[in-house]
Amino acid sequence: MSISITLLAQLIAFVLMVWLVNKYLWAPLSALMEARRKKIADGLSASERGKHELKLAQERSTELLREAKDKANDIIAQANSRSNQILEEARNNAKTEAERVVAQANAEIDREVNRAKEELRTQVADVAATGAERILKREVTDKDHASAISDLIARI
Amino acid sequence: MATENAGGSPVEYIQHHLTNLSVGEGFWTLNIDTIFFSVLLGALIVFVAMRIGRGLRAETPNGLQNAAEGILEFVDEQIRDSFGSRAPKIIAPLALTILLWVWLMNFMDLIPVDLLPAIASGLGVEYLKVVPTTDLNTTLAMALFVFALTIYYSIKVKGLGGYIKMFLFHPFGKFLIPINIVMTTIDELAKPISLALRLFGNMFAGELVFLLIALLTLGASTSASLLIWFPLQVVLDMAWIAFHILVITLQAFIFMVLTIVYIGMAHTLDDH
């Protein structure tokens, strides 16, 4: 058990072992673990970023929704006013049309009245003439006749 | 147990077990068994490492990779505790090698003391010492490598002047330079020696206790005495194995931690 050349052999074996352990165990495994650590860290930061983006998107969607609501309200208001306007127009049109029809009817009535008056007048003249003829039992001169008729007409 | 060597006295039995299979004489003695088992265990580590390396998966690590990652994290934690983040690149594989290799070499202690030597003698090999860490050459080799690294990093961090200054002025300031040199030299040399002897001593003592337990039935010649000693031997052996599992793990861990601490100390700049 004394110190001998075995020590040198063991020293070489030990150094070799350190080198082999580094090459086959430590280096690949620690590289892998380092990569995994980095991946996890990246994933966590990515999820953090995703959360932030989600928050932004939510804010934006809320804003868009509010804008859309405002716009819809505007459109409804516009539509309401337009419908009122159309209604008003229609009412006005109907009114003027009714007035026009009434006026036409009035004019017709007036014409009819005048025509009836005219007819009545001539008939009255005839009746008067006939009546006068019978009363006078004589032929009335055209001159008398005419003056009598115009006298009558004027009186009617 | 131990029927192979039943003919010898207890002293011969123990001496036989403590003799290395070796070639050469004097300083040029090469302990074949020590080298064989340490290289075999090293090859086992490399083989398992390669197997893990082939099926390396980042997302879904399997059982063996999980275990390796756990050990690796554990070692890394020890290093971070004494270095912070600026540990040199060699320290992590060095510490991992020490932990795994020393533990496996210590583990050879738990194999029944007569099993492998009996098989070897059946194959015509006379001596066999199966625990490489009960050979001072193994532990001292590792300790010297660690010592060389501490000197290298001391000089690298403090500069050659700083390293010499540490010897000149270290414990007592500039008025006691001769004493300082002696003190610091002892201090520095004590590190590798204590590192080597602690592991060697623990493993050697553990091996010796196993041998003593094995001796209980060695001298028993009658079946009546066997009846008494054999149950005692079984109980003692189990108790010592249970205790020794802790010892081998602890010793491997201590060797690793002290390696990290010594190299870490080499990195601290003195303010003396």
Image (tube, coloured by chain):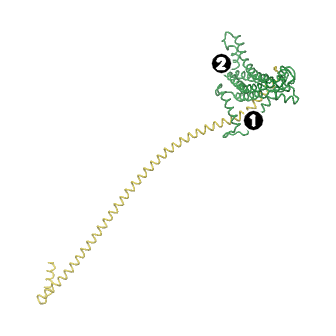
Chain colours: A yellow, B green
Neighbours of disc 1 within 10 Å: few (<14), some (14-19), many (20+): some
Q: CA distance from mark 1 to mark 2?
A: 42 Å
Residue at horizontal 30 percent and vertical 67 percent from the top: A98
Residue at image point 50% right, 44% down: A58
List x then y, in percent, for residue B182. Answer: 72, 12
Answer yes or no: is residue B34 visible: no
Mark 2 is surrounded, within 10 Å at the Cα level, by few (under 14), some (14 to 19) or many (20 or more) other residues, namely few
Q: Is residue A40 above or below residue B84?
A: below
Residue A123 lies, in percent from the top left, at: 19, 83
Depth check: B231 or B163 in front? B231
Q: Which chain letter matches label 2? A: B
Question: Horizontally, is B53 left or right of A135 in the view?
Answer: right
As helix, strand or loop, the secondary structure at mark 2 comes to loop
Which residue, given by chain and number where applicable, does mark 2 sit on? Answer: B270
Q: Chain of mark 1?
A: B
Dots 1, 2 in contact, CB < 8 A: no
Please give the residue where the numbered disc 1 appears in the rendered image. B48
The three-letter amino acid code for the residue at tag 2 is Asp
Find the residue positioned furthest to the left.
A136
Residue B49 placement, left or right of A137: right
Amino acid carrying label 1: it is Val
